[in-house]
Image (tube, rainbow, N blue to C red):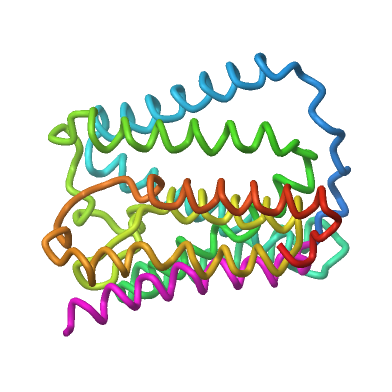
Amino acid sequence: MHTLFSSLLLSAFFSGFLLFGLYGRDRFDFDIIKTGKPLALPRKVVVLLLIVVGVACASFAYAAMALSGPALLQMYYIGLFFVAFCIGVFFLLPIQRLLHRLSISIGIALLFLWLALALGMPWLGNFYMAASLLWIAPFVFHRWRIRQFHFIVFILVFTAVDIINIYFMDQSMIFSDADFALNAIVRFGEFELGIGDFLFAYLTVEAVARYADTRPAAMLALFLGLPRFLIRVLVPAAAGMVFPYTIFMMPIVLFVLWYCHKSKERGKVNTC
């Protein structure tokens, strides 16, 4: 029963994060950044660029973990989430003077970082890592007007990189994630999801909200948290297995995008 509750808690936290980001995204102040123009690159070029960037990011992350020592890797984790959290606070504060906004953002980010590290409570670390992502999806779609085709290619490349990372890379060279604080793993009990899964899902929810409407995006946010819990209920033996969660999310996302596109063609965007 305890393990079932932990699995339910993780799924609820996942969907709650997506819903919070969806309905709180308008609170970010991106006015200091100009709205981008649509990407005008040919489709083949976009596909190639996304593949190259995906492979490069995966290779860099793997090399950073495999070739660096524990101390350096811990500093990398802390620095990464501190900077991301600080940027999110910066865009959230209603302060016009940039220097004051930056100073307060750094102070707030340092305070929450200290609480997450000093108190040693797992839920604080989960909160800090998840909160550091809240600005990314709104920023991406504010800065660049991404066509739906380009985003679908991104979904496929991200899923492929995730599968390669889980199944084909030698994990024995990487230090145990349990050795680090803010280790890019959101964990409740014995159940966990990588922060990359959170970012992937958040971007897809934001994309549906942009391409279609908020209501289907909210439904997607709820559904994306279900597979993790259903796997635990229907296949208890899979509780200790490591698998890329994106392979469960990707079909759901593609179906929602397809359905909303068809509904839009029929003039029924708000009902998709």
The one of 250 and 242 positioned closer to us in this rendering: 250
Main SS, magenta region, reads helix
Which residue is the extreme one toward the bottom? 1
Q: Residue at x 40, y 74 (%)?
A: 124
On the image, the x and y values in percent for residue 80 come to 47, 47
The one of 215 and 178 positioned closer to us in this rendering: 215
Q: Is residue 145 above or below residue 199?
A: above
Q: Residue at x 38, y 45 (%)?
A: 247
Q: Residue at x 80, y 52 (%)?
A: 264
Quadrant showing the C terminus:
bottom right
Q: Is residue 129 above or below residue 248?
A: below
Q: Residue at x 31, y 68 (%)?
A: 230
- Residue 201 horizontal side relative to residue 31, left or right: left
On the image, the x and y values in percent for residue 114 come to 43, 69
The one of 271 and 170 positioned closer to us in this rendering: 271
Task: Tell me where the magenta segment starts and ends, as one range.
Answer: 1-28
On the image, the x and y values in percent for residue 204 come to 59, 51
- Taking the magenta stretch, the answer to whether it contains residue 20 is yes
- Taking the magenta stretch, the answer to whether it contains residue 245 is no
On the image, the x and y values in percent for residue 9 come to 34, 77
Quarter of the rendering containing residue 3: bottom left
- Residue 125 horizontal side relative to residue 92, left or right: left
Quadrant showing the N terminus:
bottom left
Q: Is residue 223 above or below residue 182?
A: below
The one of 127 and 96 positioned closer to us in this rendering: 127
Q: Give the total of numbered labels.
A: 0
